[in-house]
Amino acid sequence: EMKDGSTLRVIAAHLGLLNRSRQQQARMLLEIIGSRDEHPTVLMGDLNEWRLGDRSALNTLATVFGLPPAVPSFPSRLPVLALDRIMANRPGLIERVVTHDTPLARLASDHLPIKTVVKLGSTAEG
């Protein structure tokens, strides 16, 4: 809960490697969120999905979160795939998703971290 009494929900997810698993996990997330949609929500994590299309978990999640920015974060040595995403269920809630690209970040993981700014003032109304 924030100072103004509103609630910001943050979900960290790591979706499966198989397309079927990702689809199932995306549908489950939407089912859970759907019954609690009154709160602004940020979904972030390794979604293991870089393609759009009928069978993409990104398209499934886009029904609530919109299409997320695609920031190449994998592999960390030479990032070409946008596997990691940050998305929100309210327009304007997040701004400018970027990678945190440092020598240490490239050593620490096979994915570069991604980051955003959450605009807390935009959480009051849906």
Image: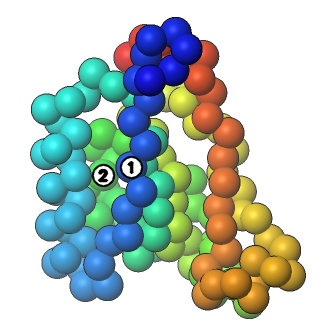
Q: Is residue 45 visible?
A: yes
For the residue marked with disc 1, what is the amino acid? Ile
**At 76% from the left edge and 65% from the top edge, which residue is drawn?**
100
Q: Quadrant of residue 24?
A: bottom left
Q: Name the residue furthest right.
A: 103
Which sits in the foreground, 28 or 80? Answer: 28
Q: Nearer the viewer, mark 1 or mark 2?
A: 1
Q: Residue at x 31, y 57 (%)?
A: 59
**Mark closest to the chain's N terminus, 1 or 2:** 1
Circle 1 residue: 11
The structure residue drawn at horizontal position 25% and vertical position 72%, both measured from the top left corner, is: 22
| Residue to which mark 2 is pinned | 61
As helix, strand or loop, the secondary structure at mark 1 comes to strand
Type of colouring: rainbow
**Residue 120 placement (x, y as % from top left):** 59, 23
Q: Quadrant of the N terminus?
A: top left
Q: Return the mark for residue 115.
A: none
- Does residue 122 sit above or below 74 in this rendering? above
Tell me the kind of residue under disc 2: Leu
